[in-house]
Each structure stands twice: as C-alpha cells, then as structure tokens.
Image: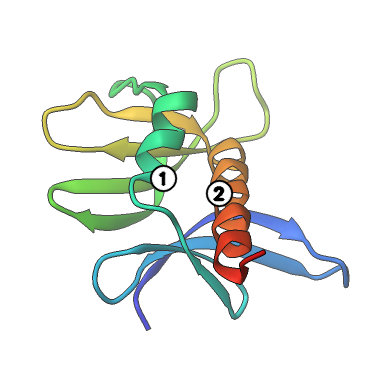
Amino acid sequence: MAPALKIRELVDATGALAAVSLRLATGGALELTRGEDAVALPSRALEAVMARYGVPFDPEAAISVEGTLALGNGRTLRHVRHVAGYDVIARDYLVYEGPGAEPLCAMSATVARGLEHLADVARGRAAGP
C-alpha cells in the first residue's frame, strides 16, 4: 500500500476516530482515503483547493512537521503543526510546494473538507445518473 499523509481526523458515526488521508495511487493519481474507502480525486484538485484557501507560507514560522507526501514532479505536501504566540492549542496546517511557485499554507481541516467535497462529486459522477 502506498504511503499516506493524514490530513484530518474526525469522529465517525460510531464514535470512533477516523483518519482522512491522501496517498498516491498507481499511475500517480491522488486518492482521498477514510478507512478502507479510497476515492481518486480529479486532476489538480489539491492545487485548486490550495489556490483557493492557501496563503503564502512563512518560512520563519515555528512549526513541527507531522508528515510529508511527495506528489511527484517536484511537488510536496507537508502536514505541519503551529502554535501562535496567542494560542494554547496547536493548529494543523497543510503546506503545498510546487516548482516555481510560492509555498501555500492553509488549515488542514479546510483543505480536507474541500477535497472531501470534490471526492463526493467525483464519486457521484462515477455512479452515473
């Protein structure tokens, strides 16, 4: 099984913790996974969500890297944790880096929800009318 990067954790209908992750499938497609369920995302979905919600990443920010996923073609996605000076609880962010572009950062829950929505649309289109 391909390595996965956890981007969100939630409580499912049974009350158990469920991880939402991204992984590269055979052929390079990006898949969103939750448990055993995996859905191929539309091409460039991650880039579109990061362009919509991301802001320039501050390389001076005090972060801890929780995980990294190499996306191919010089692109990476990092899950980082940051505690701002006025916060007591760390917040999770995703940092997207691509060649020739400024790294973008967005809250991981926001990115995950955007990708989950796109996965739901892709699943609906695959099921047909």
Taking the spot 40% from the left edge, 44% from the top edge, the residue there is: 46
Q: Observer-nearest residue: 122 or 13?
A: 122
The quarter of the picture where residue 80 lies is top left
Q: Which residue is mark 2?
A: 118
The secondary structure type at the circle numbered 2 is helix
The quarter of the picture where residue 107 lies is top right
Q: Which mark is residue 89?
A: none
In this view, which residue lies farthest toward the bottom? 1
Total marks placed? 2
Mark 2 is on which residue type? Leu
Cα–Cα span, label 2 and label 1: 7 Å
Place of residue 114 in the rendered image (x, y in percent of width and height, measured from the top left): 57, 41
Question: Do the numbered discs 2 and 1 sit on residues whose CB atoms are within 8 Å?
Answer: yes
Place of residue 30 in the rendered image (x, y in percent of width and height, measured from the top left): 37, 61
Q: Observer-nearest residue: 47 or 8?
A: 47
Mark 1 is on which residue type? Ala
Taking the spot 55% from the left edge, 21% from the top edge, the residue there is: 84
Left or right: residue 103 compared with residue 61: left
Mark 1, residues whose alpha carbon is within 10 Å: few (<14), some, or many (≥20)? some
Q: Observer-nearest residue: 109 or 90?
A: 109
Taking the spot 11% from the left edge, 29% from the top edge, the residue there is: 100
In this view, which residue lies farthest toward the top? 86
Q: Relative to residue 23, is residue 95 depicted above or below?
A: above
Place of residue 111 in the rendered image (x, y in percent of width and height, measured from the top left): 53, 40
User: Upstream in the sequence, badge 2 or badge 1?
Assistant: 1
Left or right: residue 62 compared with residue 102: right
Left or right: residue 40 compared with residue 26: right
Place of residue 78 in the rendered image (x, y in percent of width and height, measured from the top left): 36, 46
Taking the spot 68% from the left edge, 28% from the top edge, the residue there is: 88
Q: Which residue is mark 1?
A: 45
Judging from the image, the colouring scheme is: rainbow
